Amino acid sequence: MILMRDKRAIIIRSPKLQRIRNNLRDLFYLAVNSKWNEVHDTRRGLLFRSDGSRRSIHDFSPDELAYFRKLQEQEASITDMINRSILSCVTCGKGKRDMVYNKAYGAWYCTECYGMERLSARKRAKIKAKNRRPKSCEEKVIESHSKTFL
Ligand SMILES: [Zn+2]
């Protein structure tokens, strides 16, 4: 298991190395996307009979349903893995940028999005210091997320 520091920026200044990094990210993305497509196509295949007519999951045997659910979990797991990996920014989705890891959130942000999150977290912290009042559940979640950038 690789242990990451709380905040880790990966910044590459050389255009040549940036190109290599971007190409490697593209290759990893294509490999992971290929696996996702394979799982997705297998799962979708369960929804059709050999004559091409559509089946409902209510037509599945218990084993088929368990397999269908397992494939759904794999798809979600792969999607989550891609979204939180260094291959792309969890906020804007861009992949050809320098990245910062936010351990508390378990995801990579491009330096631009990380900077904006950090700036808004600082503003929120200042406002919080001025206004102490009961918060809604949504405000608490936003505040908790925001603190990870301070
Ligand atoms: Zn971004």
Image (spheres, rainbow, N blue to C red):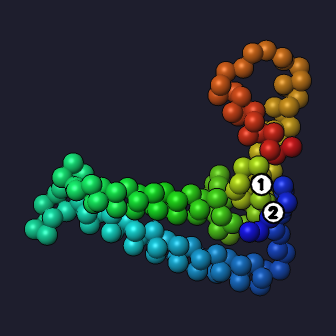
Residue at (33% x, 68% y) in the render: 41
Report the quarter where the C terminus lies. Answer: top right
- Specify whether residue 98 is in view: no
* CA separation in Å, label 2 and label 1: 7 Å
Residue type, numbered disc 1: Lys
| Badge 2 or badge 1: first in the primary sequence | 2
Residue 6, image x and y in percent?
Answer: 84, 55
Circle 1 residues within 10 Å: few <14, some 14–19, many ≥20 = some
Does residue 9 sit above or below 125 in this rendering? below
Disc 2 target residue? 4
Residue at (76% x, 68% y) in the render: 2
Residue 116, image x and y in percent?
Answer: 77, 47
Quadrant in which residue 107 is drawn = bottom right
Q: Which residue is at the front of the view, 139 or 106?
A: 106
- Specify whether residue 39 is in view: yes
Residue at (33% x, 69% y) in the render: 42
Q: Badges 2 and 1: C-beta atoms under 8 Å apart?
A: yes
Disc 1 target residue? 103
Circle 2 residues within 10 Å: few <14, some 14–19, many ≥20 = few
Quadrant in which residue 43 is drawn = bottom left
Quadrant in which residue 28 is drawn = bottom right
Does residue 59 sit above or below 19 in this rendering? above
Residue type, numbered disc 2: Met
**Left or right: 38 as drawn, with respect to 15:** left
